[in-house]
Image: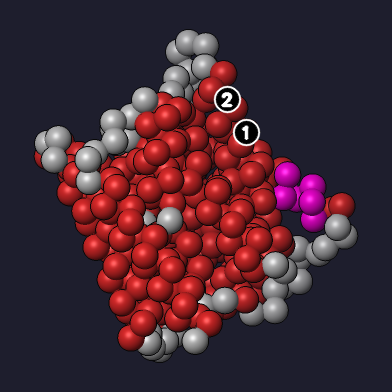
Amino acid sequence: MNLLSALFLTVLWSTTPLAIKWSVSGMPFTLAVTLRFLLGATVAWGLLYLWRQSAWPGRALWRSAGIAGGTSAASMLCTYWASQALSSGLVAVLFGLIPLMTALFARLWLQERLGRIELAAIALGMAGLLVVFAGQLSAGPQALWPASVVLLAVALQAGGAVLLKRHSTGQSALAINACALLVCMGVTGLAWLGSGATLPSQAVPASALGAIVYLGIVGSALGFSVYYRLIQRCRPISVALISLLTPATALWLGHAVNQEAVPAALAGGSALIIAGLLLHVLAQRS
């Protein structure tokens, strides 16, 4: 089950940066992310009703939902804003840094120690990301500020995952997600209202609407539930290492579907990333 969940998240996280890029086309980014969470919350609560799960057992669940929803909302607001200026591939590359930040937070807050093979796996993955990252930024310094905002989003996502690991034991991942999506919807809705509650000035492209539906149902209602369940069952660093594969696949997807330029450093960086993943798998089985 964990393997299937990891494969699902790999596909989801590979397609999410491109979907975010499309969803901010033709509408304010705050509205795009709010609509995503509105749809996601609606579907998640519908699933809770169908599966007869209670989402109101007490403060413990809402504490977990506050952690998950608050960090996810802040992270996504940063990501959506930066996606207006950055390619989907570069956003994916930066999110590939999640394992390093997760390992740092897990060491600080959960006192987790990493074995030498795991450290080597992370080092290989980080080296690959640096190779790809250097190629992406070679076009000029104009991407540095939005790239820094994405790094903040990565830190929020990693820190939230580690905190959730500490506080969500024994709770339903779907219930956590349903409540967390309400928090996300509230935070991003306030951001949209605070920015002037601007509506699209012209017809929204079908690709943007489709991306919002995909991110709301698959990315939020289903994806976050699977993600939270894996966090509960596995070490946070093991879940975070899934993201090492997605930068390379997202770069190729952005090139094939959105005609985004692919740097020459992609092949070498991708090889290092995959080598790090394989080494991590070996470490888990030894």
Q: Secondary structure at mark 1?
A: helix
Q: Can residue 225 be seen in this snapshot? A: yes
For residue 156, say whether it is visible.
no
Against 273, is 248 above or below? above
- Residue depicted at x 34% and y 44%: 91
| Residue with the mark numbered 2 | 209
> What crowding class fits label 1: few (fewer than 14 Cα within 10 Å), some (14-19), or many (20 or more)?
many
* Mark 1 vs 2: CB contact within 8 A: yes
Locate the N terminus and report the quarter of the image it occupies. bottom right
**In the image, 270: left or right of 218?**
left
Provide residue 109's location: percent of width, then percent of height.
40, 82
Q: Residues within 10 Å of mark 2 (few under 14, many from 20)?
A: many
Residue 190 at x, y percent in the picture: 48, 42
Instruction: Give the CA distance from mark 1 to mark 2.
Output: 6 Å
Verify whether residue 206 appears in magenta. no
Q: Nearer the viewer, residue 193 or 68?
A: 68
Q: Which residue is mark 1?
A: 213
* Residue 113 pos. (x, y %): 38, 88
Q: Is residue 16 above or below residue 161?
A: above
The residue that appears at 59% across and 27% down in the rendered structure is 210
Task: Give 141 or 172, whichever is nearer the viewer.
Answer: 141
45 magenta-colored: yes
Judged from the image, the secondary structure of the residue bearing numbered disc 2 is helix
Image quarter of residue 257: top left
Amino acid identity at mark 1: Val
Total numbered labels placed on residues in the image: 2
- Three-letter code, disc 2: Leu
Over which residues does the magenta segment extend?
A: 43-48
Magenta span main SS? helix
Q: Is residue 243 left or right of residue 38?
A: left
